[in-house]
Amino acid sequence: MAEFSESMTGQDEKRRRRSRKGEARRAEILTAAMRRFAEDGYQNAAIGDVARDVGLSLPGLLHHFPTKVDLLLAILDKRDLESESFIGPYRSDLRGLLKGMVEVFRRNAEMVEVIRAFAILNAESLMKDHPAKAWFLDRATQLQNDIAATFEEAVADDSIDGEIDGRAMAAELIAVMDGLQMLWLRDPARFDMVGGLEAYISRLLVSLGLEG
């Protein structure tokens, strides 16, 4: 029995090593794919080019991601998890959420290629039958709902004026962030995306009575 247990432990350790190696390879593929999507767009990017970028044959890449759609959805899921874990701590109240948006932009400013890839995917997803269409629609809807709900909570506890329309404010915030991000992506060296949002949020907090 002892020999059997030791044998199984060795096999488990080998499986864990293979698993860690596989996860590292998958992460490498996702990074290369985002770079390709940023350069060529999803529609024009060739999965064979992604394979060559990471030193794999096409069958080798397809072992990890059977189709280009699988690769795209894995990138979107990874981005969702990263965004949620980062913004989560800022959601305690409206002021925290608004300040957190500036921190998200500050973080985004350090990864221009990732943000460019997602901006391109977002625009491409407006096309009929695009595989990311539902993901970006759900994401935009959820973001507006979350922001609106935080405004409504602030109205309910009398932190801000009861006449404020939470959904309208959420739409305004999303439009401002998208517009600032697009200007920055066109010329990151000359346009201060973080400073632009920080100034807007500061004015908004004053107008809401949340900051003197």
Image: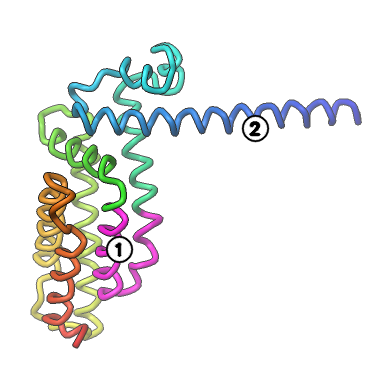
103 w.r.t. 151: above or below: above
Q: Which residue is mark 2?
A: 16
Which of the 4 image quarters holds residue 133? top left
User: What amino acid does circle 1 point to?
Assistant: Glu
Local SS, label 2 = helix
Task: In the displayed orientation, state which residue is furthest to the bottom.
Answer: 212
Vertically, is 1 above or below 181? Answer: above
**Three-letter amino acid code at the position of disc 2:** Arg
Residue at the extreme right: 2
Left or right position of 193 against 73: left
Task: Please report the residue visible at 10 percent of the width from the left and 71 percent of the height from the top.
Answer: 165
Position of residue 127 relative to residue 162, above or below, is above
Which disc is residue 103 wearing? Answer: 1
Please give the range of residues in magenta. 84-108
Closer to us: 88 or 26: 26
Q: Label 2 neighbourhood size at 10 Å, few (<14), some (14-19), many (20+)?
A: few
Q: Quadrant of the C terminus?
A: bottom left
